[in-house]
Image (cartoon, rainbow, N blue to C red):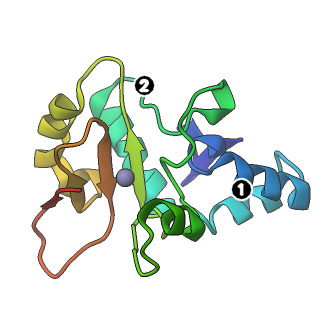
Amino acid sequence: MRIIVDGRETNFITQEWIPREVHHYLVNKYGYNNDLYMSAFFRYIHIDTIRAAQRIREFLGVPMYFNTWHMGGKFNYRGYRPVNYYLKQSGRENYISQHQRGLAGDFHTNEYTPDQIRDKIMPAYKELGFWRVEMGVNWVHFDLAKGNSDELVKFYP
Ligand SMILES: [Zn+2]
């Protein structure tokens, strides 16, 4: 379902931001293409995350790929991630990711490498509305976890 924020259609659909299993759970519970589904969606993804993604989309001017499961692709956890995903992946019960809080997105584009994208968006982080970037990975992770300072936080996996 097309995500509308602040009265404007974004470039994103809900499937790009939630895993297949969450989407199906919501569709079974609320149906699809309706307000109930949409308000339930925003319990998983913070609206500011979509706002930041849309600003980045317009800033870059090229398509961004988050989840691709709905198109037969392999990406299922590039937006919201359920807690049990981490229990399986990390074996650590106390591992907290901004993906779990609906405050993070991972994407790639076909036009630019992840390093090129980071070089473009990092100087504009305040206007674009994110506070952290993951370095040294072959996708672009941004998130909205703001620390004590106004500086952009660069972290490594
Ligand atoms: Zn990430």
Does the residue at mark 1 contact the one at mark 2 (Cβ under 8 Å)? Answer: no
**Above or below, comparing residue 110 to residue 141 in the picture:** above
Marking on residue 63: 2
Report whether residue 38 is seen: yes
Between 73 and 29, the one lying in front of the other is: 73
Badge 1 marks a residue whose secondary structure is helix
Q: Point out the frontmost of discs 1 and 2.
A: 1
**Point 46% across, 79% down: residue:** 93
| N-term mark: 1 or 2 | 1
Between 60 and 16, the one lying in front of the other is: 16
Q: Residue 116 at x, y = what percent? A: 16, 29
Q: Quadrant of the N terminus?
A: top right
Left or right of residue 3, residue 155 in this image: left
Q: Residue 70 at x, y = what percent? A: 67, 32
Residue tagged by mark 1?
22
The amino acid type found where label 1 is placed reads: Val
Q: Quadrant of residue 58?
A: top left
